[in-house]
Every structure is written in C-alpha cells, then in structure tokens.
Image: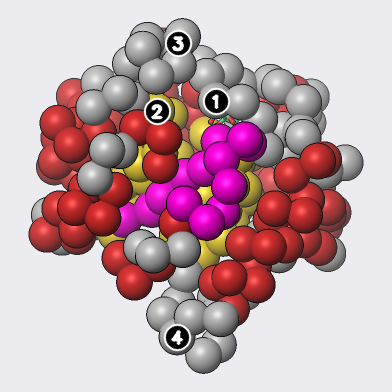
Amino acid sequence: MAQPSQIQLVASVLSFDLSRLGEECTALEQAGIDGIQWDIMDGHFVPNLTFGPDVIASVRDQVSIPFEAHLMVEDPDNMAARYAKAGCQRVIVHVEACRHLHRTLGAIADLGAAAGVALNPSTPLDAVAHVLDLVDMVLVMTVNPGFGGQTYLKSMSPKISQARRLINSTSKPIHLEVDGGISPDTIGDAVAAGANVLIAGSTLTRDPQGVQHAIEELRQAAG
Ligand code: DX5
C-alpha cells in the first residue's frame, strides 16, 4: 500500500493575532499553507484555554483550505461533534483522554469527519496499534501539549520512525503528523524520521519577512 508521502504544512494559529483570525487564515491560505490546525484546549487536559466551535465557524467560510481540530481536552466524546459541525474536516483526539478510544474514533467517523489520534511524548505507540483501521492520521507530539513556542523534542525521532514503520505495515492510507517546535532547523529531522504532515505555529509568526517566506523556508528545509 502506497502511504501518503507528499509533505504537507499545516499552520497552528495558536500563536497568531487572535483579534484578526479571519485575516490571518486568509493570509496563510494565500501564502500556500496546506491547512489550518485549531488547538482546542479546555484548561484541564492542558493548562491553557483556547477556541470554542463558534470561533472556528466564524472563520470557516473565509478560506477553503481544510481545518482540523486538535482536541487537547478531558472530554473529547462531548466535544468532537461540535468541532466537526463548526467546519473541521478532521478531529484529532488524544489517547490519554479517551477511556474507550476505539469507540471515540468510530463516533468521529460516524460524524463524517476524518479521525486522528495523538500521542503525548511519554505515551507508547502501542496505544494506537489496534485502532489504525479507524484513523487517517497519527499525530506524534514533539512537545508537551498546552503552549506554542516550545522546543522540539529530538528524543521523539525514534518514536516518529517507529510510527512510520507501523503505518507502513498497514493497508490503509494514514498520515503521520508531527506537532511542536517545528522550524527550519527541526523540520528535516521530523521528515527524515518519517513525518509527512508538519504543524507549524510560532515559526510562522517569527519570520520578519512574513508567512510566505516562512512557509518557503520550511518547504526548502523539509527537502
Ligand atoms: C501544543 C500545540 C503547539 C502548536 C504548535 O499544545 O499543539 O505544538 O500546535 O506550536 P509551535 O509550532 O509554536 O510549537
């Protein structure tokens, strides 16, 4: 089975100007980003508190690129449908927040959304070995979730490679996404380890030449 291998850059808007999210998403689309990731934080699973579904719905029709919701929440079963309805084509849940992960992922698919599963740095890959038939994405976190602007955990490289081997052993097309600390200095490591979808947040806002230049730099560094 040929697994998806084209490198995709998806922007996390957590570090962007939250008073201008519509314009920021429009600028990202015009700059050639492949999608937007909304970091959903409930102040319990992670200390931070971020976007409700209405915020996403208010931006949805301003751009046509895909949205995904990264649920860093204690109760994903109660939240997933709201973010799918708000316009997210993919809903990603954390293994660590799901008592019945198989059921939760199936319920996301029943909504008509793609289901993704995320692993915190300390969570072994085995936790997703029996649900790969239900997902179109495995997300390996390269920071501890909750904040943008953190340092990429290079110690996760073997885990990314292990995830790549696991995905390649299946007959289902599954993306391997890496989220946290991605920059021109770290994207090469993540791609070499097997990631094909990279989340870029603060690296896009730090570039004095703007998001288009930052995206070009990342694509170049990805090889
Ligand atoms: C952590 C968040 C961040 C964000 C990306 O909970 O998920 O990883 O999306 O932020 P940067 O790219 O600034 O690490």
Among the two numbered marks 3 and 1 on one chain, the one whose residue lies closer to the N terminus: 3
Among the two numbered marks 4 and 2 on one chain, the one whose residue lies closer to the N terminus: 2
Which residue is tagged 3? 48
Q: Which mark is residue 72?
A: 2
Image quadrant holding the C terminus, namely: bottom right
Which residue is tagged 4? 171
- Within 10 Å of the Cα at label 2, are there few (<14), some (14-19), or many (20+) other Cα atoms? many
- Residue 65, horizontal then vertical, whole percent: 39, 52
Q: Report if the beta carbon of the residue with label 1 is closer than 8 angstroms to ligand 1.
A: yes
For the view shown, which residue lies furthest in the bottom direction? Answer: 1
Q: Which mark is residue 178?
A: none
Q: Which residues are magenta?
A: 115-127
Tell me the distance, in whole angstroms, between the alpha carbons under discs 2 and 3. Answer: 9 Å
Q: Is residue 120 magenta?
A: yes
Tell me the distance, in whole angstroms, between the alpha carbons under discs 1 and 4. Answer: 30 Å
Q: Report if the beta carbon of the residue with label 2 is closer than 8 angstroms to ligand 1.
A: yes
- Within 10 Å of the Cα at label 4, are there few (<14), some (14-19), or many (20+) other Cα atoms? few
Q: Quadrant of residue 221?
A: bottom right
* Mark 1 touches mark 2? (CB < 8 Å): yes
Q: Amino acid at mark 3?
A: Asn
Among the two numbered marks 1 and 4 on one chain, the one whose residue lies closer to the N terminus: 1
Mark 1 residue element: loop
